[in-house]
Image (spheres, rainbow, N blue to C red):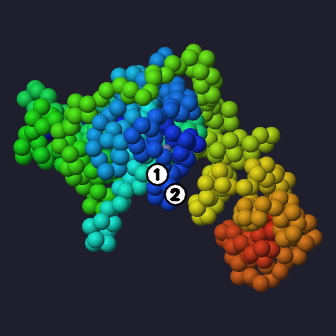
């Protein structure tokens, strides 16, 4: 059977504004339940919302970074629905006057670059959170702290043709939002959430049949997203084989992904826009977005990850893979550039940062933002290696110590007496000692077994705790063995 997978994404991004979208409550994850609330975000009678200016700026900034057109006037609407975590009975959102429209994001696919069209970007407020106890009591609590948290919703066209493309798209959005510094995009804490609309176009008897669209929710990691979408493809294929249902038969169905079972289950059936009875928010006037604000935000967009990746390849001669890793986070790319500044081999610095710094952060569970070692210390360490004072193997030891203590590499080398032994007389002594202790290997080498020299070099390095200059030591060893 010939079929195509069709996926569109709705990405919700929580903004990092100091205060909430329409009141002055603190906007922060967590907190003692129901302490970051006020009459406005609780929707008490008579409370009046006020638009957070920073939310408008962030929305314009995000829209420009996603190549959108910015509206000159944008307005808010009420989206009405009843749910325990929504005390107002409606959510302030945007309906027909979204702040941005018509953008695009390029993703990398197996066949090269592909543009995913963005229909719109709008602002809305988040709802609270239901906490269902799992102690068998059947009790649920509700925490309104999150009510009124500003969100951007970014809606794509159904341009993605595989779970992998959908994941790349959301990763791209995440990268950009983090670059702009407007969201931390933490999927586990829910500051980046993605709903995916997925169905299949099945080609049979020269006709195209479209299966019912599933809106899949609750995917709180990229892995979960990939698995949920793969599951949906299988499920929709099976359903088609059994019931031959099409989109016109059932409409759109909301399904939740269960990470434990790896399956999606029906949450709500047939939900239409009309059910929300959108109407203009009577308490908020439309907001005018001046050309000045748009220009100011345009300047603030700066260099985005895709452009940076390209530049890292052309300016520093990095391989595409290394450029991708470094450019994925603004903080990491800044760290690299600061370390590479004034050093003649940026490729070497790049690989050191990716493997050593990356490895260290991984084991310590730190982010690059939390890493306190100044990038100049990495440059210094490289220079010490280049000048032959220590070997690159010892450099790893020095790095481990300086990453933890913050000391400069020279201090550590001095303190731990790690400097490389290049002195001929000293090295001759070590060579003689190793040759004396390993007569068999010496004899083997003289009989023509060249690999014996590797073993002897290994003994010399061990004896000097890795401090012997390998080139000088090897030359002496060959000399003494009568090979040079
Ligand atoms: Zn409030």
Residue 273, image x, y percentages: 24, 31
Q: Residue 423 sits in which quadrant?
A: bottom right
Residue bearing mark 1 = 145
Quick one: SS at disc 2?
A: loop
User: Residue at 23% of width from left, 44% of height from top?
Assistant: 254
Residue 460, image x, y percentages: 77, 73
User: Residue at 24% of width from left, 52% of height from top?
Assistant: 264
Circles 1 and 2, Cβ within 8 Å, touching? The answer is yes
User: Residue at 58% of width from left, 61% of height from top?
Assistant: 365
Q: Nearer the viewer, residue 209 or 410?
A: 209
Q: Is residue 419 left or right of residue 354?
A: right
Q: Is there any visible trace of residue 272 in the rendered image?
A: yes
Q: Residues within 10 Å of mark 2 (few under 14, many from 20)?
A: few
Residue 400, image x, y percentages: 71, 64
Q: Which mark is residue 31?
A: 2
Residue 77, image x, y percentages: 37, 28
Q: Nearer the viewer, residue 154 or 204?
A: 154
Q: Earlier in the sequence, mark 1 or mark 2?
A: 2
Q: Is mark 1 within 8 Å of ligand 1?
A: no
Q: Is residue 302 left or right of residue 60?
A: right
- Of the 4 image quadrants, the one containing the N terminus is top left
């Amino acid at each position: 059977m010939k079929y195509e997978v069709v996926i569109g994404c709705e990405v919700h991004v929580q903004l990092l504004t100091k205060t909430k979208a329409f009141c002055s409550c603190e906007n922060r994850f967590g907190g003692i339940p129901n302490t970051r609330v006020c009459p406005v975000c609780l929707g008490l009678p008579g409370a009046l919302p006020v638009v957070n200016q920073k939310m408008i700026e962030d929305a314009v900034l995000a829209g420009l970074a996603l190549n959108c057109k910015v509206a000159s006037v944008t307005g808010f609407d009420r989206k009405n629905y009843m749910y325990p975590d929504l005390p107002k009975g409606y959510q302030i959102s945007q309906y027909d006057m979204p702040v941005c429209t018509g953008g695009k994001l390029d993703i990398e696919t197996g066949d090269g670059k592909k543009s995913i069209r963005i229909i719109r970007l709008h602002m809305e407020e988040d709802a609270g959170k239901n906490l269902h106890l799992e102690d068998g009591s059947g009790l649920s609590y509700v925490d309104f702290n999150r009510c009124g948290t500003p969100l951007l919703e970014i809606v794509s066209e159904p341009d993605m043709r595989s779970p992998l493309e959908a994941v790349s798209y959301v990763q791209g959005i995440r990268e950009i939002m983090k670059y702009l510094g407007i969201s931390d995009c933490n999927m586990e804490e829910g500051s980046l959430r993605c709903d995916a609309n997925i169905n299949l176009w099945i080609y049979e008897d020269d006709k195209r049949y479209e299966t019912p669209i599933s809106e899949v929710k609750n995917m709180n990691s990229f892995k979960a997203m990939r698995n949920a979408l793969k599951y949906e493809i299988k499920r929709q294929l099976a359903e088609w084989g059994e019931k031959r249902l099409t989109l016109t038969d059932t409409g759109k169905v909301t399904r939740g992904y269960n990470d434990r079972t790896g399956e999606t289950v029906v949450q709500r059936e047939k939900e239409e826009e009309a059910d929300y009875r959108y109407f203009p928010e009577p308490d908020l006037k439309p907001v005018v977005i001046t050309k000045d604000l748009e220009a100011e935000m345009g300047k603030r967009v700066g260099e985005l990850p895709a452009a940076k990746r390209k530049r890292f390849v052309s300016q520093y001669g990095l391989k595409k893979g290394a450029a991708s890793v470094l450019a994925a986070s603004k903080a990491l790319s800044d760290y690299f550039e600061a370390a590479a500044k004034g050093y003649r081999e940026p490729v070497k610095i790049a690989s050191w940062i990716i493997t050593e710094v990356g490895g260290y952060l991984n084991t310590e569970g730190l982010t690059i933002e939390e890493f306190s070692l100044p990038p100049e210390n990495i440059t210094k360490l490289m220079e010490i290696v280049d000048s032959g004072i220590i070997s690159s193997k010892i450099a790893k030891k020095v790095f481990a110590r300086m990453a933890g203590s913050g000391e400069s590499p020279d201090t550590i080398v001095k303190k731990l007496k790690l400097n490389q032994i290049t002195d001929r007389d000293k090295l001759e002594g070590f060579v003689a000692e190793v040759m004396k202790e390993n007569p068999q290997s010496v004899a083997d080498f003289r009989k023509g077994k060249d690999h014996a020299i590797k073993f002897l070099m290994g003994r010399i390095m061990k004896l000097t705790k890795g401090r012997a200059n390998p080139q000088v030591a090897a030359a002496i060893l060959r000399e003494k063995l009568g090979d040079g």
